[in-house]
Image (tube, grey):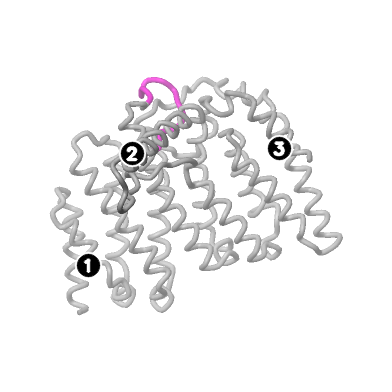
């Protein structure tokens, strides 16, 4: 009853859906398409004077305080779900500002406000699904015109027109709500923070670790698809004008976190656990996706040098990490040989050498 009118007030502000807000970017964000933010000291002063900067934290802090006092007095965590519902409303808002503030407050709620012993599996399930949903892009049209067997020419033409209308609507929404592109990199940052903190990983368990890692992988694919649609429509912003992050910049930021997850999972998990089908599936999917992205960028002469350098560094780190694994761990990754074989013709000499060493080790184990 208190939060919903406040959300509606924030969403009425056009700047909260389409405005440029560099203060919403996470640390170590890499620009290679959009212009870096101004170094002027008053760049975020305007945001601090608006509702989101003056009221949001006080409102949420008050609700969290009531929740914690209720847990202490009655030993019941029912108000945790209420706080999560409030934060979920923020995440689903049209306002990028509000969604990012909600994401950061969600991270604080489960990692600092709550004692980890009080975070139940149900709470982790709710948090994980909130983060999974916020990684997706609303209104994403299918990549091709849906096929309907036995359709007449007229029906096929209608499907074609409906697909074009969906594309046009998606592009219009992306222009109108461009501020929501700040959400992707912040969601990646929150997931990265959770999955690289040992006591939190232990608290959430394997199921939600894999769920969030897979969710980030799906998010990366969606952002790449959105970038393709916007590029084909010619609606890309000029790199000289300040704007919210480009989808491909979000992809690069998220892939750096994904690389950390892969390395951490293989280095800190024993061979018996690593053999788990869930682990093997997500490792294969995300390793393959990274190597495929590297090869695609290497073959693209128009690829940004900054993007190529960062992706090459990730692939190097992954291969060095795999080369550092014991034979016992390496033997659990039976999918690795065919995945690596696609990189044997890379122009990068050092990567090609690393691939050959790994393939030799894998061959000797057969």
Determine the image quadrant of residue 283. Answer: bottom left
Residue 272 as seen in the image, left or right of residue 82: left
For mark 1, does the 10 Å Cα neighbourhood hold few (<14), some (14 to 19), or many (20 or more) residues?
some
The front one of 356 and 5 is 5
Q: Nearer the viewer, residue 300 or 322?
A: 300
Q: Which residue is mark 2?
A: 160
Label 3 belongs to which residue?
Answer: 57
The answer, for residue 53, to whether it is visible in the render is: no
Counting from the top left corner in percent of width and height, residue 74 is at 85, 62
Location of the C terminus (image quadrant): bottom left
Indicate yes or no whether the magenta region holds residue 212: no
Residue at far right of view: 73
Residue on which disc 1 sits: 337
Residues under labels 2 and 1: Cα distance? 41 Å
- 105 relative to 234, above or below: below
Q: In which image quadrant can residue 154 be found?
A: top left
Circle nearer the N terminus (3, 2):
3
- The stretch in magenta equals 237-248
Alpha-carbon distance for marks 3 and 2? Answer: 47 Å
Residue 58, percent from left and from top: 75, 37
Question: In front: 221, or 321?
Answer: 221
Mark 3 neighbour class, 10 Å CA radius: few under 14, some 14 to 19, many 20 or more: some
- Residue under the image location 59 percent in, 28 percent down: 16
Q: Could you tell me which residue is drawn at 59 percent across and 39 percent down?
A: 99
Q: Are marks 3 and 2 in contact (CB under 8 Å)?
A: no
């Amino acid at each position: 009853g208190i939060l919903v009118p406040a959300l509606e007030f924030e969403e009425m502000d056009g700047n909260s859906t389409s405005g440029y807000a560099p203060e919403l970017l996470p640390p170590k964000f890499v620009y290679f398409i959009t212009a870096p933010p101004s170094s002027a000291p008053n760049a975020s002063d305007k945001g601090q004077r608006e509702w989101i900067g003056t009221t949001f934290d006080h409102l949420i802090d008050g609700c969290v305080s009531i929740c914690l006092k209720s847990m202490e007095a009655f030993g019941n965590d029912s108000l945790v779900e209420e706080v999560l519902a409030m934060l979920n409303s923020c995440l689903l808002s049209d306002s990028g500002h509000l969604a990012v503030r909600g994401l950061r407050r969600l991270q604080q709620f489960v990692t600092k406000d709550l004692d980890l012993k009080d975070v139940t599996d149900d709470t982790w399930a709710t948090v994980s699904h909130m983060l999974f949903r916020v990684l997706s892009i609303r209104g994403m049209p299918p990549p091709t015109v849906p096929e309907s067997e036995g359709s007449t020419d007229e029906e096929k033409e209608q499907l074609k027109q409906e697909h074009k209308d969906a594309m046009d609507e998606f592009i219009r929404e992306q222009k109108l709500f461009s501020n929501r592109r700040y959400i992707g990199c912040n969601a990646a940052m929150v997931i990265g923070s959770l999955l690289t903190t040992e006591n939190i990983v232990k608290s959430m368990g394997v199921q939600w670790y894999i769920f969030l890692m897979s969710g980030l992988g799906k998010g990366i694919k969606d952002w790449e698809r959105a970038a393709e649609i916007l590029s084909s429509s010619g609606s890309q912003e000029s790199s000289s004008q300040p704007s919210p992050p480009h989808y491909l910049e979000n992809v690069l930021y998220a892939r750096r976190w994904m690389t950390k997850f892969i390395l951490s999972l293989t280095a800190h998990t024993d061979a018996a656990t690593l053999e788990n089908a869930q682990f093997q599936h997500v490792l294969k999917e995300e390793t393959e996706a990274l190597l495929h992205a590297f090869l695609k960028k290497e073959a693209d002469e128009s690829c940004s040098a900054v993007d190529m350098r960062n992706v090459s560094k990730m692939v190097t780190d992954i291969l060095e990490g795999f080369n550092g694994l014991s034979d016992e761990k390496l033997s659990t990754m039976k999918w690795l040989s065919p995945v690596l074989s696609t990189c044997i013709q890379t122009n990068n000499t050092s990567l090609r050498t690393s691939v050959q060493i790994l393939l030799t080790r894998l061959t000797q184990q057969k």
